[in-house]
Amino acid sequence: MTYRHRWTGNPRPHELPHYQALLDDTDWASLATARGTGESLPTALARIINPDPAIRAAATDHALREVTHQNTVYEATVPVALYVAAILNHPAIAVDDFGHDADAPPHRRTLVKLLEWLSDTALDADDECLAISERHLGKGLLDQDREMHAFRDLRPAIFSGVHPLLSHDNADVRDAALVAAIPLTEHPLLTAHRAELVDHARRLLATSTDRQNRDHVLDAMKAWGYHTSALENADDIAARDRYARPRAEHDSWWAGDGTGGYSEDPPF
């Protein structure tokens, strides 16, 4: 696959380009997305920082949908991720847009949606995902999958946009920032931040009831060598027990010949 990303210069791994430079200097129409090419992305991305929350919400859904499908890092994913990270502290989306109209249902703020997408994308390119792909496709996958390689290289730049939000005054934003930061810190330049993330993780575990966020945080702390038993509640223990059987079956499947005992690939 030809790697055709184009933006002003090559950003240093720890520095974010300005969001406007990414919009103006990326050849979006030449980049593959989940639904074709990215010619519609500049308009959608620009509208994410529109002052109107309804326009922001629709533009966010449109832009992220273009690069979200089947855990794949597309050609357009990297500049979209850089753009998203670069606007996380933009005044237009930093405002409280939960909605205060009593007649309208509450909605998630744009900032949380963007952080959740960065988290999901970082997980699609993390070490575990890479290892699974290499079991199927062989070593040296990153030499062929330049999109995943590029995203992994630019994790420090993306982290620099996420990091300030770890201390946001809104709990939903803080928690989403933490969950996004965790997979990014697999990059060698970021592992030193894990001690800081553990402090934020302890706060989340003391205050949050969100099952998915708690699972992400507990899994990360265990992987980093921290004891978590004193931080777990009854729901965490029950969830761990529910997960134990599927994980054991998964490990057993891989311990065989990679096909669960079948001569052909399993019907995924």
Image: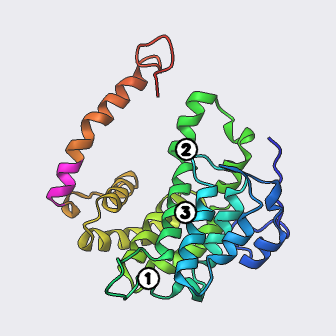
Examine the rendering and report whether any part of residue 144 can be seen. yes
Which residue was labeled with disc 2?
70
Q: Which mark is residue 29?
A: none
Q: Earlier in the sequence, mark 2 or mark 1?
A: 2
Q: Position of residue 18 (x, y in %)?
A: 74, 78
- Tag 3: residue type? Leu
Instruction: Give the structural element (helix, strand or loop) at label 1.
Output: helix
Q: CA distance from mark 3 to mark 1?
A: 18 Å
Using the rendered view, name the quadrant where residue 209 is placed.
bottom left
Q: Which mark is residue 118?
A: 3
Numbered marks: total: 3
- Tag 2: residue type? Gln
Residue bounds of the magenta highlight:
233-239
In the rendered structure, are the residues bearing label 3 and label 2 in contact, judged by CB atoms less than 8 Å apart?
no
Direction left: furthest residue: 234
Which residue was labeled with disc 1?
167
Q: CA distance from mark 2 to mark 1?
A: 32 Å
Q: Which marked residue is nearer to the observer: mark 3 or mark 1?
A: 3
